[in-house]
Amino acid sequence: MRFVDLSARIGQSPDEVPEPLRTDIEYSGHAEGAGLVERLLGVPPRLLRDHEGWAVETFTRFGTHNSTHVDAPWHYNSHIQGEPAAPIDELPLDWFFAPGVVLDMSAREDGDAMDVPDAEAELERIGHPLAARDIVLVRTGRDVFYEELGYLALGPGVTPEATRWLFERGVRVMGIDAWSWDAPLYMQAQAALERDEPGIFWAAHQCDLPYAQIERLVNLGELPPTGFQVACFPLRIVGASAAPARVVAILPE
C-alpha cells in the first residue's frame, strides 16, 4: 500500500494571523521536563538519560476548525431535519473509512460553485458510478495557498443542490481542499446582503442534511480519481461541532 497524507501540518501561527483563526502552541523542552520530574517525583536530572526529561507541547489556542478537520451536523444548525443535530463524537465510525472519489474542480474561479451538472459531468469523465458511502473529495487546487493569509478567501465552493444530490446518493462524508465547503464567506455575505433573504449565506452548510464535511485538505492533486480508500477519523471531542482529523488516502501499489 501507498499512503498520501491529505492533512495539513499543525504549527504555530504567524503573528499576523487574527486571534479567532490562530493556533498557538507552547513547547516545553527536555531540560524543562527534567525539572518537572524532579519537582513532581523527586528524581534528579542526574538519574535521567542525558539529564533529560519529557518534552511536552500545550495548545494554548487551537480551535476545532483551525486545521484539517471534519465538521459535524451540529456545526451547521442546532436541529437537522427536525431532530437535534449530532455532534462529532456521535457520528458513526464507518462513515470515516471508505472508498474515495476525487472530483477535479481546480479550473473553476473563486465563487464559481460546483453544481449538480458539474458533479455529474466529472463522474462521467472519470467513469465512476457513485456508490453509497463513497467519500467525495472536491479538488480546487487552493491548498497551494494554505500557508497564506488570503487562503480563507479562496475556493469555488459547492452549491446546496450539489450537496443534496451527493447526500441523496448515499454520500455522508464530503471534503474539499479549500477553507470552506461553501464559497468564500465574503462573497456569500455580499450576496446575502444584496438579496436581503435567508438561504444565501452558508447555503450548503445549512441545507438541512445530516452529513459531515472535511475542510482544509491538501495534496488531492496526488491522487487518482478513484481506486483508493480514505481514512478520516475525527478526534472524539464530546459535544463538538468539529474535530481535527489525520486524513490519509490509502492506495494499492
Image (tube, rainbow, N blue to C red):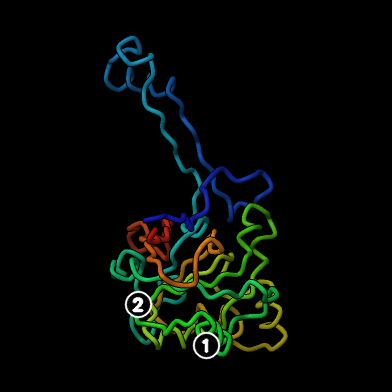
For disc 2, the marked residue is 133
Eyeballing the image, is 206 above or below 184? below
Q: Secondary structure at mark 2?
A: loop
Q: Secondary structure at mark 1?
A: helix
Disc 1 crowd, CA 10 A, few/some/many (<14, 14-19, 20+): some
**Does label 1 or label 2 sit earlier along the sequence?**
1
Residue that sits furthest to the front in the current view: 253
CA separation in Å, label 1 and label 2: 17 Å
For disc 1, the marked residue is 120
Q: What amino acid type is highlighted by mark number 1?
A: Glu
Q: What amino acid type is highlighted by mark number 2?
A: Arg
Identified at 65% across, 50% down, the residue is 17
Identified at 51% across, 55% down, the residue is 67
Give the percent coordinates (x, y) of residue 192.
66, 83
Q: Nearer the viewer, residue 86 or 7?
A: 7
Q: Nearer the viewer, mark 1 or mark 2?
A: 1
Give the percent coordinates (x, y) of residue 216.
54, 62
